[in-house]
Amino acid sequence: MGIDFSTFGSGPAPTPTDPRVLFDALPDRAARYEFLRDPQGQVLQTWYDRRSQKDLVVKLNTGGGKTVVGLLICQSSLNEGEGPVLYLAPDPYLASQAMEQAAELGLDVTNDPRSTRFTSGEAICVLSLHRFVNGKSVFGLQGDGRPVVDVGTIVIDDAHAALATVKEKFTLTLSRDRHEKAFTELLDLFADDLRQQSEIAYQGLTTQDSSAVAPVPFWAWTRRNTDVTAALNKLRDDEDLQWSWPLVKDVLPICRAVFTADKLEIQPPYPPISKISSFSRARRRVHLTATLADDSVLVTDFAADPETVGTPITPASAGYLGDRLILAPQDISASIKEPAIRDMAAKLAERVNVVVLVPSHHKAGAWEQHAQITASKSDEIGAAVTKLRKGHVGLVVLVNQYDGIDLPRKACEVLVMDGLPQAYGGLTRREAIALGDSDEMVNRQLQRLEQGMGRGVRSANDHCVVLLLGPHLSQLIAAPRYRSRFSPATRAQIDFSRQVAAQLADQPLEQIESVIAQVLGRDPNWVTAARGALAEVTYPQSTVSAGAAPARRAFDQASLGQYAQAVRHMSEAVAAATGETERGFLQEQLAAYQHFIDEPKAQQTLVKALTYNPAILRPIDGVKPTTIKPTDTQAVLAAGYLANTYADRNDFLVGVDVLLDELVYRPDQKQVPVFERALERLGYHLGFEAQRPERATGSGPDVLWATGGLKYLVLEAKSGASTDKIWRSDVAQLAHSMSWFQDTYDQTCSATPVLLHRVNTLEYNAVAPPGTRIITSGTMAQLADAVRKAMVALADAGAWSDPEAVAKQYQAHRLLGDGIAQRFSVTPR
């Protein structure tokens, strides 16, 4: 006969709110959740102590169990009466993963935001941000007349990845194909303003040149706002625009707009997140993240409290991470080529699972002969991950999936990263051009790299070998100025891996493969050394830039039409900027706010901003071209530039590899701006004065080199050409640039017209300017080879900062300015 336990006590047991006690009390959790990991318990305790603060950031290493922490925070808040509770993931795949983990924990969850179980605070609602942030959100929008769904607690997983999704949702995109009439109407409306900024960029739009990027000046956008609103309002019920138009229409006057050959993109400076009232009104918001120390973007884009964001919740130790060996084979030995690395990866895949992350289908094509699976869509990636977890698959290629997939234990023992995503949207390409190599842009790359490298280590018991392909990824882990920005645990593993790489220097790939075998075979000495490298690692204090909060306040005030206050706050953000490139970009935004109250002052601000960043908008009156000339000998200028640019031998060699990789001709017009920037930097490496007049003034050549002795090279880059002929328009552009030179420089100066194109064959009706030289793909390869040999010699001698050594090497490799164009070019035919 049993016992009636209902007679015990005076009533039902209280529901635990302490998330650690709650975890222990879960009756139906899966066997693999027997215990909380110590770091999880630590952050849950700290969160519980601080839970009344509205914005909290929880940092755990990639693979540290953030999802479990987030779900327990959700359930704790429900138990405490701080519901309804919403768990948001960056995309549908990650949302489905969170649902699975919640089920394994035995938590009551739903993915239906209309469910009464959610709205009554009985179950956690798990959604992707795509369903939460959109113009038809079931949660309601501020001011649209629909009731707003009350949400007490919101937990955002992978907060940095989530921000990208939110920005995308607050971007209105007009497609030239789908919305041809409206696109053409608006392009015609701004034609004169776009031409004033850059005639070449405008011509690129009309000829549908895929490299063309043309921002609309803020004064033109403001002046024609009524016409823009009317054109877009006609499309408010369009299948695509109905998801974004309601989110941006109220802040349209302060939006940024960028034309490309196929799109018009419109986006506010920061997401007006208050439109999603359920988010802005939530009493608790918890941001889960793993990567990087700079959390300023949570303040600017999510309007989070800078004080609480600046004091994140972290475990006592950051060393709770699986073993990783992180190698860049081409950095170890210049003789190792990418096809050989792919062959080695395929060989390893015969025994273990190898996962390759690539940014595009084009990159995936290089792995086609080796891959058992290539996946790019969400459902394909999910199916591939499931197979990898179940057993041995071989080599799997995942396209543009750098976060959110868990590949524990034997699911991924070798991870290959073959490139990082490039900026292909109009707004992101414009930002990439304007911000260049600024800290903000580099931090975005590092964040994506760290997220990718974390896919194969999901707990302290996992292990993974990470191989990085290409000079760009090598540079991010080799250069001290970049390496210091990784999270502490990843940085410790990179530093330890570089000690291993130093012992492999100049060894063949077979030797690298044998070391990989040691790691995969769990050599006890390797395991001891790898874990020792993490023993003393702790989390640093989070960084929130001093300009983040005032920049956000400025936007919020401007969105209310309070432009004087917006100018005051934006001035604080500009004053707080630490880099010149970023300061100039922020001053452009300051000028945009000033325009509403003092148009002449806004133009003056823009003129000042150009001194910091020549890639921003040019004022209405244009920019007068500035002349350049060498201030010293070629060798002295080159040595000074190299000394100031590179910290050590490895940084120097990898940096040169990156530069020369960017100077390869590729049939991709969107890569031309990268090529132009590299061409300017090549001039500095060679000891020339260099500038990009077309970018700075809207007229003139892509790049100008002053090679000494009042001699110049006028350089027009057609590196993205795919044809076997040089078109008439290409040489006409070169002729225009020569006319610009003659108007800008006096008769004591002489210039050689140089076209950079894969071939030197002119179209039948194309007439090149007198004296034209063509740097073909073949002669560019010769120039790159000469540069590489000179730089390697300087690196081996440790003499890149010595003008005499530089002069000697440049002379030996025929890189001296006098006649350099003739040596590495051919005549047109």
Image (cartoon, rainbow, N blue to C red):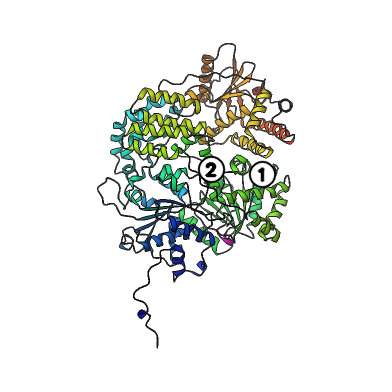
Label pair 1/2, CB-CB below 8 angstroms: no
Which sits in the foreground, 173 or 73?
73
Q: Mark 2 sits on what residue?
A: 445
Q: In this rendering, which labeled residue sits more in front, label 1 or label 2?
A: 2
What residue is rendered at 38% in x and 39% in y? Answer: 553
Magenta stretch, main secondary structure, is: loop
Picture layout, residue 779 above or below residue 174: above
Q: Which range is magenta?
A: 404-411
Answer few, some or many: residues within 10 Å of disc 1's Cα (few below 14, many 20 plus, some between 14 and 19).
Answer: many
Judged from this view, the residue extending furthest toward the bottom is: 1
Q: Is residue 588 magenta?
A: no
Q: What distance separates the C-alpha of mark 1 from that of mark 2? A: 20 Å
Q: On the picture, is 382 further left or further right than 689?
A: left
Q: Is residue 405 magenta?
A: yes
Answer few, some or many: residues within 10 Å of disc 2's Cα (few below 14, many 20 plus, some between 14 and 19).
Answer: some
Q: Which structural element holds mark 2?
A: helix
Give coordinates of residue 428: x percent, y percent: 46, 38
> In the picture, which quadrant includes the N terminus?
bottom left
Judged from this view, the residue extending furthest toward the top is: 747
Residue 707 showing in the rendered view: yes
Give coordinates of residue 812: x percent, y percent: 74, 27
Q: Mark 1 sits on what residue?
A: 330
Picture layout, residue 91 above or below residue 797: below
Q: Earlier in the sequence, mark 1 or mark 2?
A: 1
What residue is rendered at 33% in x and 55% in y? Answer: 151
Which disc is residue 659 wearing? none
Judged from this view, the residue extending furthest toward the left is: 145
Residue 828 showing in the rendered view: no
> In the picture, which quadrant includes the C terminus?
top right
Give coordinates of residue 158: x percent, y percent: 47, 52
